[in-house]
């Protein structure tokens, strides 16, 4: 039996094998993973008594006075208020994720998505309030659209349709009764556009280190903006 085990082919879990195979083919693995995490979080939100929604849903530092919970700045991106909300956001992520992940590469795309989502939460902090219940990937997705818009323009591509799409979505956010967090949209859009500019202007191989440091600097600025708001809120 020991000899048979030694000579038997090594097998790996089917999911891991398929993911590695897809990664080797250049499939948008990060996009699929982000969609999978968002769907899984939504399913967990539906379980009564689990407390998932209460633990992640606010895009702010605290859900009530005195409870500092800074992880909400990122985790709120993966929570959604309804199945329709989830489907609309994941459909848009699927469209732009495939485009940008193939264009930028997996790690750059992941950095763009997370930083844009963080930027959306910062927009809510500054333009709304630190304990407003805001959920959804809209800020991150607006960041993807902002980055794609900048990259398209800088590379000489046509972006008229994207301009129209962004304009419609931004206007909807200001219509009373729609209950849309335009602050998160705006914060994500500005952050994504800035990151798109950095990526397209530092795309040469010799500029990779500069690109990394600039992305780190964007994250640091977002953290400082969050802390500065918290400081004034405490005062």
Image (cartoon, rainbow, N blue to C red):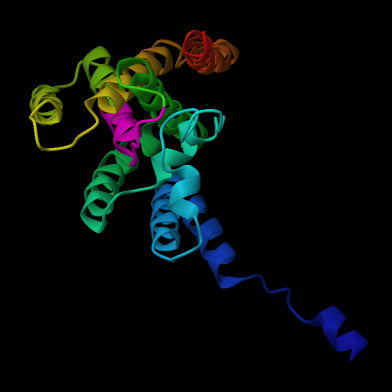
Residue drawn at 49 percent across, 17 percent down: 226
Residue 61 shown left or right of residue 187 in the figure: right
The answer to whether residue 26 is seen in the rendering is no
Q: Which residue is drawn at 15% across and 25% down?
A: 170
> Which percent across, then down, holds residue 157?
18, 21
Query: In the displayed structure, would residue 162 be above or below residue 53?
Result: above
Residue 107 at x, y percent in the picture: 52, 34
> Relative to 221, is 49 above or below?
below
Q: Is residue 169 above or below residue 146?
A: below
Q: Does the magenta stretch include residue 223?
A: no
| Closer to us: 211 or 169 | 169
Determine the residue located farthest toward the bottom in the rendered image. Answer: 1
**As rendered, which of 71 and 207 lies closer to the eye?**
71
In the rendered structure, which segment of residues is drawn in magenta?
Answer: 131-145
The residue sitting at 56% across, 32% down in the picture is 67
From this viewpoint, is residue 126 visible?
A: yes
Residue 150 place in picture, x, y as percent: 27, 17
- Name the one closer to the observer, 8 or 33: 33
Image quarter hosting the N terminus: bottom right
Q: 195 and 24: which one is in front? A: 195
Q: Quadrant of residue 129?
A: top left
Q: In this view, does 53 lie to the left or right of 88?
A: right
Q: Where is residue 117 in the image (x, y as percent from the top left)?
A: 40, 31
Q: In this view, does 180 lie above or below 156?
A: below
């Amino acid at each position: 039996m020991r000899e048979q085990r030694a000579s038997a082919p090594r097998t790996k879990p089917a999911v891991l094998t398929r993911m590695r195979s897809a990664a080797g083919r250049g499939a948008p693995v990060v996009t699929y993973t982000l969609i999978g995490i968002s769907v899984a979080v939504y399913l967990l939100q539906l379980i009564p008594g689990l407390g998932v929604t209460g633990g992640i849903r606010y895009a702010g530092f605290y859900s009530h006075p005195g409870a500092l919970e800074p992880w909400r700045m990122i985790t709120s991106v993966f929570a959604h208020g309804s199945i329709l909300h989830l489907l609309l956001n994941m459909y848009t992520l699927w469209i732009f994720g495939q485009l940008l992940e193939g264009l930028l590469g997996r790690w750059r795309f992941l950095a763009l998505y997370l930083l844009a989502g963080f930027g959306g939460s910062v927009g809510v902090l500054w333009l709304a309030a630190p304990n407003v219940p805001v959920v959804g990937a809209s800020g991150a997705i607006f960041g993807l659209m902002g980055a794609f818009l900048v990259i398209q323009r800088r590379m000489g591509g046509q972006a008229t349709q994207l301009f129209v799409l962004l304009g419609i979505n931004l206007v909807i956010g200001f219509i009373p009764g729609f209950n849309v967090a335009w602050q998160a949209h705006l914060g994500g859009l500005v952050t994504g556009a800035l990151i798109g500019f950095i990526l397209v202007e530092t795309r040469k191989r010799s500029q990779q280190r500069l690109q990394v440091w600039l992305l780190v600097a964007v994250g640091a600025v977002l953290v400082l903006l969050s802390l500065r708001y918290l400081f004034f809120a405490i005062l």
